[in-house]
């Protein structure tokens, strides 16, 4: 015991001496020194710009400069961790050294260097087709309910336009323009090897919103046929491959939370006459009609202010990832609730996902199991209220004591009964109508990849997948509401109830064998497989009046079709410089007759990695140079019609609202024949592509240029036919050809790389020109097919499909103007001959993204532009001619432009309303701050603020130049959104 207490007998002075000695020794061992060094490529010896150098176990770090050099302060016994994209992480002890040389080895399996392609992966440097891959952590994000919200403007040749500003609104995606006229122009979307149904179900405004953007890790867009042909019949319009986030064996247990709150306001309103202006106009214009001026009220009502509001929203996402033993996993849940700026509109969604990816049998069996589910509720506001707010008399009151209209003001006849031809009270259109849907969606797959023990170069891959969507919804109009008297009600003042239901099921089986081996300077990868897909759809809808809600008839309409495919691919590489890819897919569809059922779609692509040649290998400033050449064919059998059996005679059963036959006192549904065509066959698209990939200064600057031509033959079109020819006056058939030609350019770079400040910049440009080359078998150049219904008049159409012109060219009269530049009513050039004038499709699209980091601050923004697109301003054409200000016992307001245009009567088909809708938009700006330690040392966080839909530069006279189909008719305004968000990781 005495020995144990020996220290207690030491004098106090000696205690202090020992303590100071220990502290001095510790300070010596952990002395902070200035460490300098350079980071190089271990193979080439070239310096690496932008590598992250971090003191292990701390948040202290820096970035290598333009010469690959770095400098930081670190303990003399510290270890430095060096990371750079495409290289293996390196750790190097400082060991008291002040000058270090750190060599990084290239990583052949780095995730960022591996690109997903159809039925497999390939190193980015070995791509032969036009393929673009990007990870979501490099994208600027605003309020995103769908992946289209964050992908817009990020890739050359990929044009994304939302249908409007409603919460959860859908989007139109076009890759290198459209390849068809009547058939689908939507790209194939594949999520974790599951092709998802692009058309959605009734009540689902955006079929892509079931995938939570927070769960997405990478996008890969396949553009040319040499890349897409492996998907055959569904890939004529390109392919978007989405890979979601997963756990890994190396990952420690991690929890992430991402939440935000948003405020949305209307960015712009349509300029209409104020109440005082309208009173003055009516008293002047209708001075000779006392019965008209007597209709004026004494109120000053701004109907647009009444239907719009400031909208609030919030979004929350929580994920857990890690590995339980040898079982990597990731689980996530998300919830979004977003009010719309148009009153009564709301969108809410709950999502959940589970991913398991174990490796079994001594790394010979890889398993990927994924399940994603979503449940969304959508309260749709009737966008008819937008048009009603523009034209409803601003001198009238909002509410009324009349027994009609549920206390809302409405127009009455002289006998005091409701006026059925007037405009409905805008506010009542929203509050007296309830349109709500409940949508369930689930996507899942089980993928088994087995590497044979006896032949490790041979793999077998089996993928079983499903995509299920189901919707329940209804539309209810209150009895005695203003809209129950106007807008074509069959029962004067009776309310209505219209329920609907739809379910779509897509099941998939894919199986393929893959053999990959290297023989000296030769490398081959040979793959062959089989695919089976079954599509089932059933739906019903009905409408009853509220005096008969108990008797809702239900007639289900089930339909199905299937695809069977055989496919193969050969990748061959010589000397790691010369690459060849050949694919072949044979598709069979039940939508065509047995004589036309199968379509064969080949492709071939060549690539030359010139940088690997001896005459360029030592050029230090050039880090990549590759030439690509591709050719391929894809097919189309997505008819864009409801009939899955267009080659056989079928009958349609009339619904509750359609034709019925009265037999005695009982109404009976009718069976009516539909059109059919036994000769219907595959639409085919042939693509030619040439490209070049460039990299400079160790890929600090990268660029790519692609030139392409796409030719579509045997286009599937719905054309008019003579009455009695095919039961009805139209038929679906193969006729016509069209082509798209274009150029794409992308450049990315790091203009600034320093210790505290980095700047990443990305710019893309796409040019596309579309033209119809054939519409009839006789090559009749004068033949044209009208289309594009517009508001106003009876049966007016604004498009025409005509040889030599783009799809959906506007077909209008050439307006004549006076010496002051004002249009002259009814005066047209060339004896009032219609002519083709522009189209909705842009000639050029551009995107610009910037990401700046200064210490722990970051500032990001995204911009995009569309040039050469024109809109038909249907709002202006239908709401600015003066004679419409009085219509059958009611007054209608006018646009302010009516005072300068001075049209008395409608001029619907004048090219005056074909307006240049080119624009540049700042989509979002984000300012944020990263906390290395948040509350505790284990928490890392980021706080950010975002403004979305910041500004728009355009000459377009309408509310918003971004109109997906080019016909601007009261679209839901896109709001300006202010977001505050928090991300936490621990």
Image (cartoon, rainbow, N blue to C red):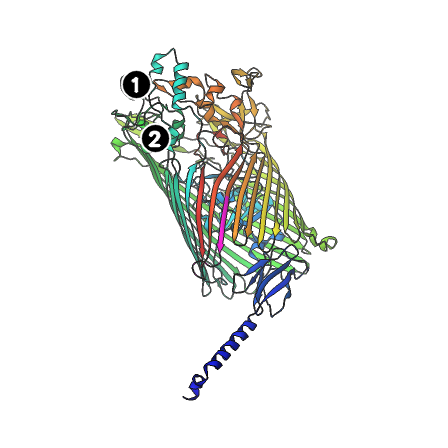
Q: Quadrant of the N terminus?
A: bottom left
Answer few, some or many: residues within 10 Å of disc 1's Cα (few below 14, many 20 plus, some between 14 and 19): few
Range of residues picked out in magenta: 925-937
Q: Position of residue 666 (x, y in %)?
A: 27, 28
Using the rendered image of the protein, determine whether residue 295 is visible from the camera's viewpoint: yes
Label located before the other in sequence (2 or 1): 1
Q: Quadrant of residue 539?
A: top left
Report whether 520 appears left or right of 530.
right
| Structural distance between the alpha carbons of marks 2 and 1 | 21 Å
Does residue 592 appear in the picture of this structure?
no
Q: Is residue 791 left or right of residue 514?
A: left
| Residue bearing mark 2 | 427
Q: Residues within 10 Å of mark 2 (few under 14, many from 20)?
A: many
Q: Which residue is mark 1?
A: 413
Which one is in front, 543 or 823?
Answer: 823
Disc 1 on helix, strand or loop?
loop
Asked whether, in this view, residue 343 is left or right of residue 601, the answer is: left
**Residue 155: image x %, image y %?**
56, 43
Quarter of the figure that contains the C terminus: bottom left
Outermost residue toward the front?
13
Mark 2, secondary structure of its residue = helix
**Residue 841 location (% of width, % of height):** 55, 33
Location of residue 919 by image quarter: top right
Q: Is residue 547 above or below residue 884?
A: below
**Left or right of residue 943: residue 112:** right
Asked if residue 927 lies in the magenta stretch, the reply is yes
């Amino acid at each position: 015991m005495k020995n144990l207490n020996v220290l207690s007998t030491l004098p106090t002075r000696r205690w202090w001496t020992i303590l100071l000695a220990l502290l001095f020794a510790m300070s010596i061992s952990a002395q902070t020194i200035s460490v300098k060094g350079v980071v190089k490529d271990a193979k080439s010896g070239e310096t690496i710009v932008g590598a992250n150098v971090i003191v292990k176990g701390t948040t202290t770090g820096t970035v290598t400069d333009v010469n690959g050099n770095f400098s930081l302060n670190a303990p003399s016994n510290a270890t430095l961790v060096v990371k750079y994209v495409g290289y293996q992480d390196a750790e190097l002890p400082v060991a008291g050294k002040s000058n270090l040389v750190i060599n990084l080895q290239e990583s052949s399996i780095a995730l960022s260097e591996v690109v997903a392609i159809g039925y497999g992966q390939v190193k980015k440097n070995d791509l032969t087709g036009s393929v673009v891959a990007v990870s979501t952590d490099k994208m600027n994000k605003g309020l995103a309910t769908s992946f289209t919200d964050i992908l817009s403007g990020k890739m050359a040749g990929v044009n994304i336009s939302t249908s409007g500003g409603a919460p959860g609104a859908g989007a139109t995606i076009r890759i290198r323009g459209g390849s068809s006229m009547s058939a689908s122009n939507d790209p194939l979307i594949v999520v974790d090897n599951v092709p998802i149904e692009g058309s959605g179900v009734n009540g689902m405004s955006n079929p892509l919103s079931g995938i939570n953007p927070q769960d997405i890790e990478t996008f890969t867009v396949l553009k040319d046929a040499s890349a897409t042909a492996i998907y055959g019949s569904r890939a004529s319009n390109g392919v978007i491959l989405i890979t979601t986030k997963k756990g890994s064996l190396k990952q420690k247990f991690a929890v992430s939370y991402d939440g935000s709150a948003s405020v949305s306001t209307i960015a712009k309103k349509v300029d209409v006459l104020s109440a005082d202006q309208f009173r003055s106009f009516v008293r002047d214009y209708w001075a000779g009609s006392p019965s008209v001026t007597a209709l004026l009220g004494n109120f000053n009502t701004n109907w647009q202010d009444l239907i719009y509001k400031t909208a609030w929203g919030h979004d929350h996402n929580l994920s857990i990832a890690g590995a339980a033993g040898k079982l990597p996993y990731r689980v996530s849940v998300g919830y979004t609730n977003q009010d719309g700026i148009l009153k009564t509109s709301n969108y809410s969604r709950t999502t959940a996902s589970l991913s398991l990816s174990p490796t079994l049998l001594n790394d010979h069996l890889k398993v990927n199991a994924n399940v994603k589910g979503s449940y969304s509720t959508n309260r749709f506001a009737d966008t008819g209220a937008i048009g009603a707010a523009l034209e409803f008399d601003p001198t009238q009151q909002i509410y009324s004591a009349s027994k009609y209209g549920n206390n809302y003001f409405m127009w009455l006849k002289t006998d005091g009964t409701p006026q059925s031809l007037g405009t409905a009270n805008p506010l009542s259109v929203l509050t007296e109508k309830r349109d709500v849907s409940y949508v369930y969606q689930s996507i899942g797959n089980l993928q088994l990849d087995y590497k044979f023990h006896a032949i490790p170069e041979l793999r077998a891959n089996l993928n079983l997948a499903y995509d299920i969507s189901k919707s329940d919804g209804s539309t209810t109009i209150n009895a005695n509401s203003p809209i129950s008297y106007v807008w074509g009600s069959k029962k004067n003042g009776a309310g209505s109830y219209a329920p609907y239901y739809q379910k779509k099921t897509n099941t998939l089986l894919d199986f393929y064998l893959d053999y990959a081996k290297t023989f000296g300077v030769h490398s081959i990868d040979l793959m062959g497989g089989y695919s089976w897909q079954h599509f089932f759809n059933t739906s019903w809808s009905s409408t009853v009046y509220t005096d008969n809600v108990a008797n809702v008839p239900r007639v289900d309409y089930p339909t199905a079709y299937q695809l069977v495919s055989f496919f193969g691919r050969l990748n061959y590489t010589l000397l790691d410089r010369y690459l060849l890819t050949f694919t072949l897919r044979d598709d069979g569809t039940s939508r065509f007759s047995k004589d036309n059922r199968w379509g064969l779609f080949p492709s071939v692509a060549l690539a030359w990695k010139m940088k690997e040649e001896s005459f360029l290998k030592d050029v230090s400033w050039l880090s990549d140079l590759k030439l690509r050449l591709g050719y391929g064919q894809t097919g189309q059998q997505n008819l864009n019609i409801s009939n899955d059996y267009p080659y056989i005679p079928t009958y349609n059963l009339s619904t509750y609202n359609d034709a019925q036959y009265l037999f005695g006192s009982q109404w009976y549904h009718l069976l009516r024949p539909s059109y059919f065509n036994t000769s219907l066959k595959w639409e085919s698209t042939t693509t030619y592509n040439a490209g070049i990939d460039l990299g400079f200064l160790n890929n600090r600057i990268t660029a790519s240029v692609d030139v392409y031509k796409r030719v579509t033959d045997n286009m599937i079109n719905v054309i008019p036919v003579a009455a009695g020819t095919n039961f009805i006056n139209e038929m679906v058939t193969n006729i016509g050809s069209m082509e798209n030609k274009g150029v794409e350019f992308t450049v990315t770079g790091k203009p600034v790389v320093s210790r505290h400040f980095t700047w990443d910049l990305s710019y893309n440009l796409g040019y596309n020109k579309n033209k119809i080359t054939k519409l009839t078998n006789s090559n009749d150049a004068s033949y044209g097919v009208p289309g594009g219904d517009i508001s106003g008049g009876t049966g007016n159409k604004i498009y025409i499909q005509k040889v030599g012109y783009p799809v959906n060219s506007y077909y209008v009269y050439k307006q004549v103007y006076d010496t002051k530049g004002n249009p002259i009513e009814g005066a047209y050039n060339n004896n009032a001959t219609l002519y083709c004038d522009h189209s909705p499709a842009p000639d050029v699209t551009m995107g610009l993204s910037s990401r700046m980091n200064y210490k722990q601050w970051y500032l990001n923004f995204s911009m995009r532009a569309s040039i050469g697109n024109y809109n038909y301003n249907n709002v202006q054409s239908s709401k600015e001619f003066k004679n419409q200000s009085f219509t059958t016992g009611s007054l209608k307001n006018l646009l302010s432009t009516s005072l300068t245009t001075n049209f008395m009567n409608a001029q619907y088909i004048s090219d005056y309303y074909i307006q240049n809708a080119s624009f540049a938009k700042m989509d979002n700006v984000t300012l944020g701050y990263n906390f290395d330690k948040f509350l505790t040392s284990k928490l890392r966080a980021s706080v950010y603020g975002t403004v979305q839909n910041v500004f728009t530069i355009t000459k377009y006279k309408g509310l918003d130049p971004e109109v997906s189909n080019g016909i601007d008719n009261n679209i839901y305004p896109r709001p300006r959104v202010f977001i505050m968000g928090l991300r936490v990781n621990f």
